[in-house]
Amino acid sequence: MILYNCPDLEAKSSGINRIYRHVKYLVESGFEAAVLHSNVGFKRDDQPEVPVRYLKRAGDLAEGDVVMIPEMQTKTMKELSQAPVRKMAFCLSWTYAFKSLPLNENYHTYGIERIMVSCKFIGDMLGWAMGMPAHLVENSIDSNIYFPEYKLAQKKKKIVFIQRKGALIPMLMRVLQAKNSRFISEIEWFALDDLSEHEYARHIREASIFVNVSTAEGILNASFQAMRCNTLLAGFDSIGGQGTIIGDGTEQNYIIAQNGDYLSLAWLMEPLLEDLLKGDMSAWDKQAVNAQKLVEPMTVKLEKDSVISFWRRMAPNCQLEA
């Protein structure tokens, strides 16, 4: 059986969403697969209905199983290091991978055989650092809730951001207010936290700008969702976005400042905010079109095909139906 270990967390998480999606794809394709939580009875009711197993229930982990363990779950990696199961690491964040890794240990210490990633940069770097194969699986965006509902000219004078990843937002706002108080008083700044997925998406669809000031992301999933909604992007590449988002030239799809440099970000955003106040966003149509081109291929089909292709190669014995 293929088991995706998943933290027992209720918080909104693109990583948890991806774990449940992968298991759903596998079950639909005839694989024996389940989400593996720790404590008996825990499951996410906001996720697809899939089989769930538990680390702390006897018999839910069997010899020959393949366990995919998130990068921050090094405690679970260590607990399973001597178990008669195959172990792989699901690495969505480069920073969590190393924050949670004790000094003088690496994935070989725990018997991890390979890494699954959804970002080429993470795969290249972690594969190099750990000295093991890294496999890229594609990312998808739910087009049922993330879609271009409004043209740029129809959107609200509204900026959205994720507060739990927005420690630099107050400083950015202070710089912008010093330059022009109207950037703050006449433009709504809205934190996307403690919302249902549908409410979260609605606010992104109606906003003119999504600001990303996270300095450490694996894949810029929230930014890609905003791009799909025809919402303009400004912020940092968060390291994981390098090579994907473009900050200048004819292919520009993002206003990018150096990671952590909120002063330069404010300076780069000034023309955009001036146009937003004037109600003329035509100068930014090209950036929005380029962003749409970037995220257009991120379909459920592409993601599912890449997940199934990976597991057909890595665990063909777990597929019960061809």
Image (spheres, helix red, strand yellow):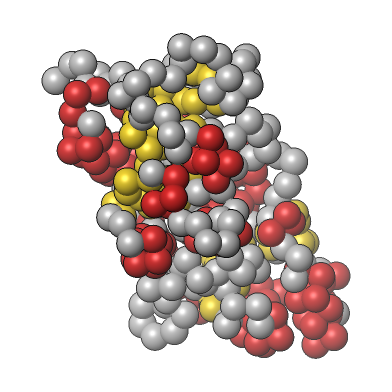
Task: Look at the image and tell me whether residue 51 can be seen.
Answer: yes
**Residue ID at (63%, 65%):** 214
**Where does the image place residue 240, in percent across and percent down from the top left?**
47, 66
**Count of marks, rendered view:** 0
Left or right of residue 205: residue 224: left
Left or right of residue 303: residue 99: right
Left or right of residue 139: residue 40: right
**Residue ID at (38%, 18%):** 62
**272 up-or-down from 308: above or below:** below
Location of the N terminus (image quadrant): top left
**305 up-or-down from 321: above or below:** below
**Where does the image place residue 230, in percent across and percent down from the top left?**
49, 58
**Where does the image place residue 181, in percent across and percent down from the top left?**
85, 79
Please tell me which residue lies in front, 176 or 214.
214
**310 up-or-down from 159: above or below:** above
Please tell me which residue lies in front, 246 or 32.
32
**Residue ID at (55%, 69%):** 238
**Where does the image place residue 279, in percent across and percent down from the top left?**
65, 71
Location of the C terminus (image quadrant): top left
Please tell me which residue lies in front, 97 or 309.
97
**264 up-or-down from 82: above or below:** below
Task: Look at the image and tell me whether residue 226 can be seen.
Answer: no
Asked which quadrant contains residue 253, the reply is bottom left
Looking at the image, which residue sits at the far left? 322
**Residue ID at (64%, 57%):** 207
Looking at the image, which residue sits at the far top? 59
